[in-house]
Image: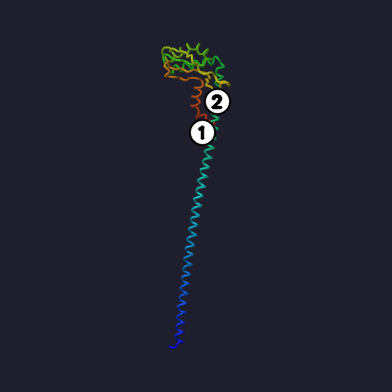
Amino acid sequence: MNDADVSKQIQQMVCFIRQEAEEKANEISVSAEEEFNIEKLQLVEAEKKKIRQEYERKDKQVQVRKKIEYSMQLNASRLKVLQAQDDLVNSMKESASKELLNIGGDQQNYEQLLKDLIVQGLLRLKEPSVLLRCRESDLQYVEPILDTAKEEYDNKANVHSPEIVVDQVYLPPAPTHHNAHDRFCSGGVVLASRDGKIVFENSLDARLEVVFRKKLPEIRKSLFGQVAA
């Protein structure tokens, strides 16, 4: 083999090696490109997932805040309604309380009412001796009817007449513009056992309070169409 053949053979080997190297490099490049694209796609999907999760988290926070705000507004509205209802009911009670002051204007009927209140108190206490307290202005009506009240009590209870002692400490006077914030009494009586352990509040104001409290569900149902708890 001469030098030309050797040179040609070497040249062919070099070309073969170069071709293999180029093909190998091309394969590596294609593989690297594929891996890069896959990794890039994975990173993009991961970021998308992270963004979606963040959006969902913030959306949930917004929905929770909306529910809380709605609940607060609803509760505030309910409180306003309840307050308005209470104001109306209390105004009715105040009107009824003012009407009590007119009862004492009719002397004959008021004396009869006082007698009935005294008899009712005696029947409730059933004590041999009682202490009676009234307004100082009602003393002129109370003292003349005590005997009649005791007699009526005797007939109903079938017992001896109790001793009734009129207390020198009087119930507060009727309310006026001058003492609007002081203790007051619209009329009626308070009876107690002599030892003070049993007290029967039978003033007009106490009677109104009892009746109003008892009738309150009916009043609310009549005014607002539902029975308040």
**Amino acid type, residue under disc 2 in the picture:** Glu
Judged left or right of residue 196, residue 179 is right
| Mark 1: secondary structure | loop
| Mark 2 neighbour class, 10 Å CA radius: few under 14, some 14 to 19, many 20 or more | few
Residue 41: image x %, image y %? 49, 62
Count of picture labels: 2
Q: Amino acid at mark 1?
A: Gln
Q: Which residue is mark 1?
A: 226
Q: Nearer the viewer, mark 2 or mark 1?
A: 2
Residue in the foreground of this view, choosing between 118 and 90: 90
Examine the rendered structure and indicate whether residue 65 appears above or below residue 180: below
Q: Could you tell me residue 63's position as x and y percent?
A: 51, 47
How packed mark 1 is, by other alpha carbons closer than 10 Å (few <14, some 14-19, many 20 or more), is: few
Q: Position of residue 90 (x, y in %)?
A: 54, 28
Q: Tell which of 21 and 101 is nearer to you.
A: 21
Measured Cα–Cα span from mark 2 to mark 1: 22 Å
Q: Residue furthest front?
A: 3
Could you tell me which secondary element the residue under label 2 belongs to? helix
In the depicted structure, whether residue 21 falls above or below residue 129: below
For the point 51% across and 33% down, the residue is 226
Work out whether 40 lies above or below 208. below
Q: Which residue is mark 2?
A: 94
**Residue 220 image offset from top left, x and y in percent:** 52, 31
User: Is 163 left, or right, of 177 in this rendering?
Assistant: left
